[in-house]
Image: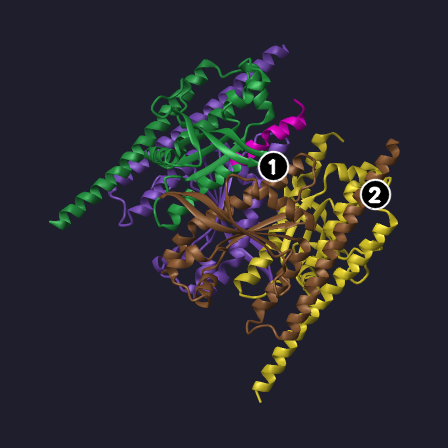
Chain colours: A brown, B green, C purple, D yellow
Amino acid sequence: MEIQQWREFLIPYEQAVQELVIKFQNIIREYTSLGQYSPIEQVNGRVKKISSILEKVDKKNMELSDVEERIEDIAGVRIICQFVEDIGTVVDLIRGRQDMEIIAEINYVAHKKASGYRSYHIIVKYPVQTVFGRRIVKAEIQIRTLAMNFWATIEHSLRYKYQGGLPQDVQDRLQKAAEAAYHIDREMSSIRSEIIDAQEAFKEKSNL
Amino acid sequence: MEIQQWREFLIPYEQAVQELVIKFQNIIREYTSLGQYSPIEQVNGRVKKISSILEKVDKKNMELSDVEERIEDIAGVRIICQFVEDIGTVVDLIRGRQDMEIIAEINYVAHKKASGYRSYHIIVKYPVQTVFGRRIVKAEIQIRTLAMNFWATIEHSLRYKYQGGLPQDVQDRLQKAAEAAYHIDREMSSIRSEIIDAQEAFKEKSNL
Amino acid sequence: MEIQQWREFLIPYEQAVQELVIKFQNIIREYTSLGQYSPIEQVNGRVKKISSILEKVDKKNMELSDVEERIEDIAGVRIICQFVEDIGTVVDLIRGRQDMEIIAEINYVAHKKASGYRSYHIIVKYPVQTVFGRRIVKAEIQIRTLAMNFWATIEHSLRYKYQGGLPQDVQDRLQKAAEAAYHIDREMSSIRSEIIDAQEAFKEKSNL
Amino acid sequence: MEIQQWREFLIPYEQAVQELVIKFQNIIREYTSLGQYSPIEQVNGRVKKISSILEKVDKKNMELSDVEERIEDIAGVRIICQFVEDIGTVVDLIRGRQDMEIIAEINYVAHKKASGYRSYHIIVKYPVQTVFGRRIVKAEIQIRTLAMNFWATIEHSLRYKYQGGLPQDVQDRLQKAAEAAYHIDREMSSIRSEIIDAQEAFKEKSNL
């Protein structure tokens, strides 16, 4: 495909990302204007670069005609939460929506990748209206805590810079850092629930 | 209703406006990246102010409970075109979409208002997904040329500033200005089609 | 220059456009939050495309090294006003600013171009801070009414589509349309000042 | 002060935040278009809410007339970096700019707060141009890593929700979490520099 054809191919994916980002950002606005805690802290989106798509085609030994079917993260949305428990709340919100259809869920929070990576991935089918009619595209929604995002951002950055592959000892240290980050995540959650518990105990007492 | 209740009431309308604006702006991007002329020049949106809603409630002697049903422009989107003919193209694009349902069309281009106002209005039902489930809201889409928009912006501005009502002679002069603006619009269109005709005549000749 | 070098060359111009657009849009916000009429209706900006720069280089027979000095509209900002008188107000606002330095003013409102084009152009020097230090770039600010903008947008669009040059009779008709648009502009202004006059006369009477 | 007066008071701060955010985001764009690693990962900004300003006035027992002089974070910008070393690079970039004047630097990275909080704070004077002339406002720029930001976001959220004050044992646990987060930060940096060292060693060898 020529550059121009790629650009046309990516148009519906760009639309999908823009619409999905707006929609998830509106969840934050909704909770905020109701004066409630939002399980979503931040939303970002991006369309995969042509060069990255081609790399994946190469690596997976695909036909170009399979790109649409087999590369599921051409449209990518990232949802960042404060606490680990918020991830579940967000997953439920997405399951309850009628404007996208979930085709897969991969729970890398409970079952981390070998690298140490944690996130909850949902693949959806999302309809966009183009000038030539309705098109249904796939999009990958990644849901993760601030700590998981911190680790993933740095790991990505290291992997990107040192393309030859990370030496084994660096990989080991990254894995340990991932565990340490996850440990803080759970510690933060337990502080949170401990305070909630304490407040409820107090309320009960004062109701006696 | 209290301010806070109004804010909550307006949330789905704000979402609708944001999504619709993004969607119509993407039509411009689509045509542009295909290297084609876009029938849409510009897209804006706004949610009606609470004070304006209350004014309308008062003027039309409505119950507050009728607001949702009877005020159709709480969510408003404005699409600006270069040429009068583009309006029809945009109307057809909207008619062909599956993500909104047209419930009314009012052709103030062919049948101007007494004030001289021209625009094509489409009222749609548009589904938004809130934290509490799916909500269907009404939105008004106004489609007009740059010249119609120029006139309407100034007329609105005059009407707003001189709230007591415009004196009859000013109204007459505004009507004439509207006609003059529409005359330029048709002149611009005829120049456009004349050039297209001339080019086609030339092509035919050179094909002899 | 290679594409990459052009991209680097254009970075400070992109910064300048972004900053200038934000700054002029803030003038609208300032008037609006003071509950006052804003002399600015709308602000847009764009950086000249590389292909358009090269065309100009070609047409003017320049050296590439002269681009920065001689092409003054690489960074371009457009300010749209409702009424002709607003143009003067905006010019004064720009003259009073200390964050940009005016190096030229061209009054195409009073002295229209042969084509019929009207706008007020101000060329400024504007400092941007890059990673490599402070850079001063030129930017062209075009100030025009909605009606002037309507005409200019359509004329640009016609000129662009029919690149061989517009036939003389089309040019004549465009010129007439420009005059008609300007006539409406002055008519709109006179309605406005007439209402203001009428209101002041009324106030005086009631003060007797 | 009435709400309306507060709104007017905050206008130049809103301008400052918007301009500063655009300017720091442009640093990311600059590095990216040069194909280089950006020491800035993300930029956010906000104007302090009126209610928070009043709380601070109350707590510090200030006169309202002292707000402008004594509250230095009415305009707030947050710069997020990947690695601890990037903070220094960003500080140097700010020190080198001519469009803002540094009036204070507080190094909470080297010298954490009692709570465990880490960030580098820079207070600047920044000139904005209003309709009524030039105004110089103060702004606080916070520079921190993703990990410091993760911790600070959650701590803020806990503090906000449990307003009565955090119990001592929760404070202790938050402090430990802050230390753990900082430990990961340094670990990540050491992995980074280790890889760089390894690559340089390799280059030297291959140059023999």
Q: Do tags 2 and 1 sit on the same chain?
A: no
Q: State whether residue A171 is above or below residue B69.
A: below
At mark 1, the secondary structure is loop
Residue B176 position, x and y percent, is 38, 21
Residue C188 position, x and y percent, is 44, 26
Nearer the observer, D135 or D159: D159
Q: Quadrant of the N terminus of chain C?
A: bottom left
Task: Name the residue type under label 2.
Answer: Ala
In front: mark 2 or mark 1? 2
Residue shown at 72% from the left, 31% from the top? D3
At mark 2, the secondary structure is helix
Residue shown at 75% from the left, 60% from the top? D181
Residue shown at 59% from the left, 20% from the top? B54
Residue B8 shown in magenta: yes
Task: Name the residue type under label 1.
Answer: Val
Report the number of discs. Answer: 2
Disc 2 versus disc 1: distance between alpha carbons? 29 Å
The stretch in magenta equals: B1-17
Tell me: D161 left or right of D24: right
**Mark 1, residue position:** B131
**Mark 2, residue position:** A198
Helix, strand or loop for the magenta stretch, by majority: helix
